[in-house]
Amino acid sequence: MKTKRRKIFILFVLYLVLSALLLALPTVAAETADDEVVPCDVECYVISDDPAGVKVRSGPGEEYPVIATLSTESIVTVSLQITGTSGEWLRVTDLYVVKESATDGYEKMLDITGWVTGPVLGVRAWPLEAPLVPLYEEQNTTSPVLTRLPRDAGVAVIGCNGDWLKVNYKGIEGWLAPGTYCGAAFTNCI
C-alpha cells in the first residue's frame, strides 16, 4: 500500500513539474522569436576607449556571461567580423589584433563567436566614386539622404542587414550602402 501511494505521489510531482515546464515554453519561444538574428557580413574594428575594454558575451543580452574582454589600449586595434544583429546587439567573430609594432599585420586573437552592444564598433566612410558618402534614411539608395560623410570619417556601427550598415555619425543615425565604408582600421579598402 505504501509503495502504491509513493508511486502516485511521485507521478503527481512529475505531473506538476512537467505542467510548469510546458506553461513556460510559449514564453521562451516568444522571446526567442522577438530576438531573431538578422544576418550580415561586415568587417569593422573596436572604437571604444573604455579602459575596462569591450565585453563579449555568449548571447545577445546582459544576462549572458562574458566570454572575452577586448582590449581598448591605444597600442592595439581589434578587427572583427559582424555576422548578425539582434536588437541593439551585434554578433561578432574572427577577432584579430593589430599591434602598432607588428610587421606582419593581423594576428588571430580569439576564435570565438560572441555578442557586443553599444557604439563600440566602427568603420570609416570610404567613397568609391564621389568625394562624399551619402548616409541614407533607409537601407535603400533611393531613400532620402540625411547627410554626406567625408572620406575617412569614423562612424559607430549600431546595426546591420546584409551588407548595409546602420551607423551613428555625430548624432545622426542612418544607413551606409554596401561599398561605401571600410572596416580596416589602418589600411585602405580597395
Image: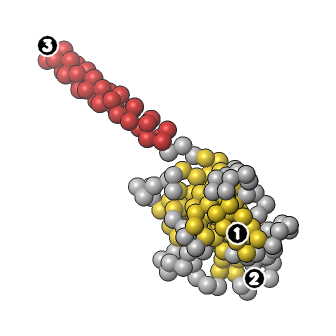
Mark closer to the observer (1, 3)? 1
Which residue: 53% across, 56% down?
89
Disc 3 marks a residue whose amino acid type is: Met
Q: Quadrant of the C terminus?
A: bottom right
Q: According to the image, label 2 marks what residue?
A: 102
| Disc 2 crowd, CA 10 A, few/some/many (<14, 14-19, 20+) | few
Which residue: 25% across, 21% down?
11
Residue 178 vs 36, above or below: the answer is: below
Mark closer to the observer (3, 2)? 2
Mark closer to the observer (1, 2)? 1
**CB of mark 1 within 8 Å of CB of mark 3?**
no
Residue 79 vs 175, above or below: the answer is: below
Label 3: element kind? loop
Q: According to the image, label 3 marks what residue?
A: 1
Q: Where does the image place residue 167, in percent across and percent down from the top left?
A: 61, 63
**Label whose residue precedes the other's in the sequence (3 or 2):** 3
Looking at this view, name the residue that lies furthest to the front.
144
**Label whose residue precedes the other's in the sequence (1 or 3):** 3
Q: According to the image, label 1 marks what residue?
A: 148
Mark 1–mark 2 Cα distance, whole angstroms, equals: 34 Å
Q: Where does the image place residue 14, in percent across and percent down from the top left?
A: 28, 25
Q: Quadrant of the N terminus?
A: top left
Q: Where does the image place residue 83, in percent across and percent down from the top left?
A: 65, 53
Q: 81 or 1, which is in the foreground?
A: 81
Which residue: 45% across, 35% down?
29
